[in-house]
Amino acid sequence: MALNTPGFDLIPSAERVAVSTNYITDFNFLNQYLPDTYEKEFERYGNRTLSSFLRMVGAEMPSNSDMIKWAEQGRLHIKYVDCTNDGTQNTSTTATYTINDQLTTAGTTTTGGSGAAALRKGQTVMITDNAGTGLTNKAVITAVSTPIVAGTAGTIAVAYYEDVQKVPATACTIFIYGSEFKKGSEGMEGSLESDDYIFENKPIILKDKYAVSGSDMAQIGWVEVTSENGASGYLWYLKSEHDTRLRFDDYLETAMIEAVPAVAASGAAVHLAGGAGAAGKAGSEGVFHSVSTRGNVFGGGFPVDLEQFDTVIQRLDKQGAIEENALFVNREMSFGIDDMLAAQNSYGTGGSSFGLFDNDKEMALNLGFTGFRRGYDFYKTDWKYLNDPTMRGGISSGAINGLLVPAGSTSVYDQVLGKNAKRPFLHVRYRASETEDRRYKTWITGSAGGARTSGLDAMEVNFWSERCVCTIGANNFLLFQNDAA
C-alpha cells in the first residue's frame, strides 16, 4: 500500500519571517495571540458621586420617633387682601367692609395668620384699592359686626379719618397700623394668640444590596482603581460592592432632595400600607417639595439681568431677610450669573478689560464669579446633581436650575424635645436609640467570603438607613425652575 506524503515538511524558522515553509493553516489563534490589556481602570466620567450638598449646608441628628414635628413662627402682623365695602365710591364718612380672606379653605388663611380676632374695635387701619389706582383711606374700626373666623366671611364697621370714601367697592386690602380710643373708654376688646405653624415630616427606609456567588469568588481577577473617596489600589469582585456603596451614599442624599409625600389612596400609599405607608403616610417631604410648596419659586428659568435678580431680593425682603445665602446652581445658571455680573463692567460689553487688579494680558483671564453682594451676600457654587445626565441634568421642561439656601441656623420649638433648639435650616434626622442606630447600617450575610450566617452559596452585603430631611423656614429658600411645557 502506497503512502501519500506532503510535498514538503513544515520547517520552523529561527526568526519571525513569514515564508511558505512555516505557514500553519489549521491553528486556533487564541492559543497564541492574547489581547493586550490595561490593568488600570480608566475613569472616563471622573468623580461619579453626587452627594455633598447636604454635608455642606446641613447636619445630621438622631431621632427616636417615626415622626418629626416642629413649630415655626407666623407673621407678627396680618394683612387682609380680599375685602369689599358696602357701596360705591361716595361721600360717606363711614362704611362696612366684608373680609373674605378666610373663605379660601376652612381652617386656613391666605394672609398668613389665624385672623380670628386680628381686627378689633378701636384699631386703626389703612385701606388700599387692589386695582392699583393709588386710592387709600385710613379709618378706625367702630365695631366688629361678624367675627372673622376660618371658613366664614367677617364684617367690620369703620369711620374714616377723611371726609370722603376714596376706595371703591371693588376688591381692596386692609392692614392694621395702630389704635386710637377716646378718653374714659374701655380697653381693647379681645386679645391675640401667637400664630404658629406646625410642620412635620417622617423618615423613610432606604435599602440596597450587593451579592456575589461563592463560585465567582473562587476566580479572582484584579483591577487597579482610584475610587471617588480618594483611595487607590487593587480590587477584585468587591469592585462592584464598592460601586454599590457609593451609589447607596448618593441615594441617601438624592432621596432627601427629591422625596414627596404620597397622596392618600395613591398607588404608593396602598403599596406601603400596613407599614410606614399606613393611613396615606408613605413618602416624605424632600427639599424640592418643601420649597415648592412652602417656599418661593422663580419661574421661567433664572434671572438674566440685575432687574430680574432684584425681584428675588425684594422677595427675600418680605421673608426672613437672611444676610448670607448660598446659590447651588447648574452650569447654565452659573454662566448666566457670570454674564450678568460681567455686564456691569462698562468695558466688558465689547470685550474683556485688562489691567484692573493686575489682570493683565499675560495672565489667565478669570471669567467666573464665586460670590457677589446685592442687598445680601450671595455665594455661588456648581451643583453636580443638577448637571449629571443620569439624574437632573438634561431635563428641560420644568427643570430645576438652582436652589437658594439661607446660611446659618434658626431657632425652632422642637415638640419632641419640648424646648427651643437651634437647628440648621437644612438638616437630616435619622432613627436611633441606645440599642439601634439606623443612620447607616451595613452587614454581610450568606456562606461565602467569610460569612457564616445562612446556607446561601453567596455573599450578600446589605445597606440600610432610615432618615428624613427637615427644611426649616422654607419661606427663606428659593427655587429657580423652568416653566413646564
Image (tube, rainbow, N blue to C red):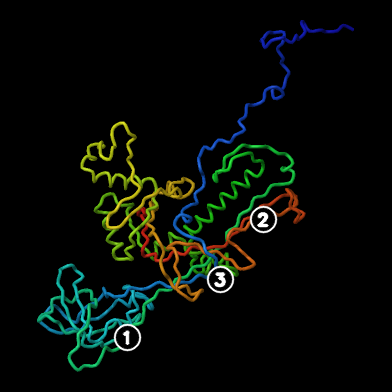
How far separated are the C-alphas under marks 1 and 3? 36 Å
> Horizontally, is 461 left or right of 252 in the view?
right
Residue matched to label 2: 443
> Residue 122 or 212: which is nearer the viewer?
122
Amino acid at pointer 1: Ser
Which of the two discs, 1 and 2, labels the residue nearer the N terminus?
Answer: 1
How far separated are the C-alphas under marks 1 and 2? 58 Å
> Residue 356 or 433: which is nearer the viewer?
356
Determine whether the residue tagged by mark 2 lies in a helix, strand or loop.
Answer: strand
Circles 1 and 2, Cβ within 8 Å, touching? The answer is no
Determine whether the residue tagged by mark 1 lies in a helix, strand or loop.
Answer: loop
Task: Estimate the x, y position of residue 447 in percent, counting from the top left.
Answer: 75, 51
**Dot 1: few (<14), some (14–19), or many (≥20) neighbours within 10 Å?**
few
Q: Residue at x 25, y 90 (%)?
A: 187
Residue matched to label 1: 191
Q: Residue at x 59, y 39 (%)?
A: 225
Amino acid at pointer 3: Ser
Determine whether the residue tagged by mark 3 lies in a helix, strand or loop.
Answer: loop
- Furthest toward the right, the residue is 1
Amino acid at pointer 2: Trp
Q: Quadrant of residue 123?
A: bottom left
Q: Residue at x 49, y 62 (%)?
A: 469
Which of the two discs, 2 and 3, labels the residue nearer the N terminus?
Answer: 3
- Furthest toward the front, the residue is 358
Q: Residue at x 20, y 76 (%)?
A: 126
Residue matched to label 3: 65
- Looking at the rendered structure, the number of numbered marks drawn on it comes to 3
Circles 2 and 3, Cβ within 8 Å, touching? The answer is no
> Horizontally, is 335 left or right of 180 in the view?
right
> Residue 421 or 340: which is nearer the viewer?
421
Task: Estimate the x, y position of residue 98 in percent, counting from the top left.
Answer: 25, 81
Task: Estimate the x, y position of residue 139 in percent, counting from the top left.
Answer: 17, 81
